[in-house]
Amino acid sequence: SFPWKQRDSSAEESMNKLDEKSEKGSTLESMQAQYMQQGGAQDSSASISEEVRNFAIYLGIDAEKEQDLFWIVDEFRSAPLPANWSEHTSSRGDTYFYNSETDQSTVEHPLKQQYLALVASERARRANIERDDGAG
């Protein structure tokens, strides 16, 4: 199971801060650069913790070839759950998430789709940069 972070309604605050960063000109590139400066992705895949590797796999990121996307893994790991969501463990030991407002339970992290979209966006951006570099 994944050790999701749980911080109640501060998820909206976190998302608002990300939106504010975007509006103020902070780009995905600057977020990635900040992550790398803080010692983000390591050069050796052997130094990647099992936890980070598991989160990368959960988001469909290749831990060997896409370490430049580990800043997304880091963001996902530290993101609080959205308002009304909480994490629980079933009697079998499986992690699931519960929304108290909708009375919905799911084994999928409530933010997974948002972060999958971010991974796809970064891959598309990378492909455009590689295409542009090859055309020059």
Image (tube, helix red, strand yellow):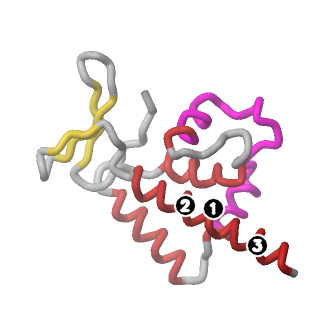
Q: Which residues are magenta?
A: 31-56
Most foreground residue, 8 or 90: 90
Q: Earlier in the sequence, mark 2 or mark 3?
A: 2
Nearer the observer: mark 1 or 3; the answer is 3
Q: Residue at x 77, y 69 (%)?
A: 130
Q: CA distance from mark 2 to mark 1?
A: 5 Å
> In this picture, is 109 found above or below 114?
above
Q: CA distance from mark 2 to mark 3?
A: 16 Å
> In this picture, is 92 found above or below 68?
above
Is the stretch drawn in magenta largely helix, strand or loop?
helix
- What residue is disc 1 on? 123
> In this picture, is 42 found above or below 131?
above
Q: Earlier in the sequence, mark 1 or mark 3?
A: 1
Residue 131 badge: 3
Does the magenta-highlighted stretch encompass residue 136? no
Left or right? Give the position of 76 relative to 111.
right
Q: Secondary structure at mark 3?
A: helix
Q: Secondary structure at mark 1?
A: helix
Q: Which residue type does callout 3 highlight?
A: Arg
Most foreground residue, 10 or 91: 91
Q: Which quarter of the figure has residue 91? A: top left
Q: Secondary structure at mark 2?
A: helix
- How many residues crowd mark 1 within 10 Å: few (<14), some (14–19), many (20+)? some
Image quarter in which the N terminus is found: top left
Tag 2 and tag 1, C-beta contact below 8 Å: yes
Left or right? Give the position of 94 relative to 78.
left
**Which residue is farthest front?**
135
Residue 120 badge: 2
- Percent across and percent down for residue 12 are 34, 63
